[in-house]
Image: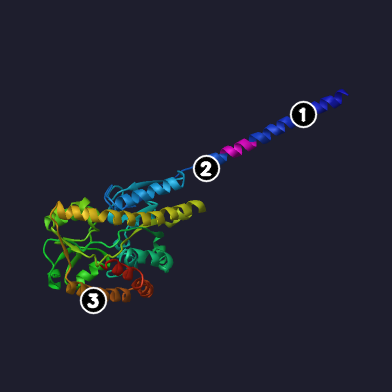
Amino acid sequence: MIKIKTWGKLALVGLTAATLVACGGSEEKETAKVEKKAEVINWKMVTTWPKNFPGLGTGAENLAKSINEMSNGRINVKVYAAGELVPALEVFDAVSRGTAQMGHGAAYYWKGKAPAAQFFTAVPFGFTAQEINSWIHHGGGLKLWEEIYAPFNLIPMAAGNTGVQMGGWFNKEINSLEDFQGLKMRIPGLGGEVLKKVGGTPINLPGGEIFTSLQTGAIDATEWVGPYNDLAFGLYKAAKFYYYPGWHEPGSTMEALYNKEAFEALPKDLQLIVRAATRQANAEMLDEFTALNNSALQTLINEHNVTLKPFPDDVLSALKKASTETLEEVAAADPMSQKVYDSFKEFGAKVRAWHEVSERAYINARELE
């Protein structure tokens, strides 16, 4: 009887100990899960924009904030403006080699590394914002963009758009194509190649260097973005002739660059969050520019006495002809550029046909008395 009770007591003690061990193991596992969930992935974002610069710079900041918040703090992105970690035009290399996990800029800055990349910012007389977004996301553009960047260990995504830009700031009037002869103008990408064809000298400068270069006469003219950004840069202090339309950048896409290894190391849900945040930033920037450009333009005209002028029709016709020739030459010089340009032309023909009976027809109708 005693032995049985003793055995029962011992069994009870053993059971209790086993239970405690089991509970302790469960607690340890739960603690490990909590600790794992609390791990923060710290990323650096380098940008081509000056610190806190409206529209473009704040677009990068907003993207970082969205990733931080949508991931519930699991990813923490710290933004570095141009020059804080790397110079503005070294963003591509910095993200490629992993110095930073992501970057924010514009693809045409990297045409020296990948000529086909410039098609993904803007094409002279090419796509509007609505059209280029459609091509990238539903017309095969993104797949081609990813193919271009794959050898550089990069994943690109559209991360903003300015809409149709302005034609630029000039220190003299443009009355004919001859006025472009010898003109030193800050204008990157394919637009710069067109300027070269009509006798000008294109110069690629980061945003932070434009004002001083224009003010000192190092350049005769510059394009930047549009009234909202140009007002913030104070470009009206360095030149008074403000031309439109922005034939060279009818819908300029900003890009987010992701280091491929860093992106693919993320859990699947965080990869989806990063993609969703970037897509949101892409739409948000266009909304901001559309909302604020006109009031900034009125300030430039009415408070700063800027002279707003359209390019003459014959100048635009000549620039369009030169643009077509330039695109054909760029495409012919590089197999990847040809591949991208073929896709661009095929999609462009379809979207223009649709917009003739939709966007253009509606805008014309809206103007009727």
- The secondary structure type at the circle numbered 2 is helix
* Dot placed on the residue nearer the N-terminal end, 2 or 1: 1
- The amino acid on which the numbered mark 2 sits, given as a three-letter code, is Lys
In this view, which residue lies farthest toward the top? 2
Residue 290 occupies which quadrant of the picture?
Answer: bottom left
Residue 116 occupies which quadrant of the picture?
Answer: bottom left
- The secondary structure type at the circle numbered 1 is helix
- Disc 1 from disc 3: Cα separation: 93 Å
* Residue 14 visible from this viewpoint: yes
Read off the residue under disc 1: 12
* Dot placed on the residue nearer the N-terminal end, 1 or 3: 1
Q: Nearer the viewer, residue 207 or 15?
A: 207
Q: Nearer the viewer, residue 93 or 207?
A: 207
Q: Position of residue 25 (x, y in %)?
A: 64, 37
For residue 37, the mark is: 2
Provide the residue span drawn in magenta: 25-31
Read off the residue under disc 3: 321
Q: Quadrant of the C terminus?
A: bottom left
- Disc 2 from disc 1: Cα separation: 37 Å
